[in-house]
Amino acid sequence: MDHRITVCTSCKHKGSACQPGYELIDRLRKAMVTAGDSIPETFEISGVACMAGCDRPCTVAYHGTRKATYLFGDIDPETDIDDLISFARSYAYLQDGWCSSVDRPGKLRKTTLARVPAAMMVLEETEELAS
């Protein structure tokens, strides 16, 4: 199964030129290495120019093949790494990615911006298509 964590790199704190997404990516990558085998799946960690969470920097998304996607906001690179790693550990075990807010660690219970169900593409075969 493929897992990704995507971090917004253009988010800025109001009144500041600071772009904390870059720091968050660096800290997350180091924390994943430290977590090692405690996370059963590999997570690709990358940045993206904008995830439209500008009023809630940093925004972070968790994606998995055939899993719900989560978008979190108000993430602090200095204080929220443990919660992000803990969620990655849990998310890796969730077959469909679905969990309630009480199952999310620490700050992530209150900073969820969106939970998007996995896209399910269904193709129906009909006699017309077969002919």
Image (cartoon, helix red, strand yellow):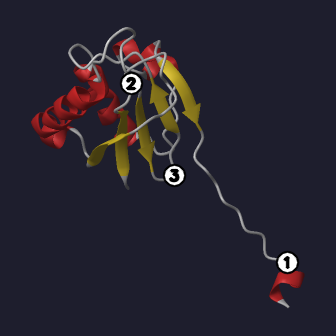
Residue furthest bottom in the image: 131
* Residue bearing mark 3: 66
Q: Secondary structure at mark 1?
A: loop
The answer to which of 17 and 71 lies nearer the viewer is 17
> Which residue is at a point 36% across and 45% down the rendered structure image?
4
Q: Position of residue 2 (x, y in %)?
A: 37, 54
Q: CA distance from mark 3 to mark 1?
A: 25 Å
Q: Which mark is residue 11?
A: 2
Q: Give amino acid for label 3.
A: Arg
Looking at the image, tell me whether mark 2 or mark 3 is earlier in sequence order: 2
Q: CA distance from mark 2 to mark 3?
A: 28 Å
Q: Quadrant of the N terminus?
A: bottom left
Q: Residues within 10 Å of mark 1 (few under 14, many from 20)?
A: few
Q: CA distance from mark 2 to mark 1?
A: 47 Å
Residue furthest right in the image: 128
Q: Give amino acid for label 2.
A: Cys
Q: Secondary structure at mark 2?
A: loop
Q: Residues within 10 Å of mark 3 (few under 14, many from 20)?
A: some
Residue furthest left in the image: 34
> Which residue is at a point 45% across and 35% down the rendered structure image?
50
Residue furthest top in the image: 15
Q: Is residue 9 left or right of residue 33?
A: right
Dots 2 and 3: beta carbons under 8 Å?
no
> Which residue is at a point 29% across and 21% down the rendered structure image?
83
Looking at the image, tell me whether mark 3 or mark 1 is earlier in sequence order: 3
Q: Give amino acid for label 1.
A: Thr
* Residue bearing mark 1: 126
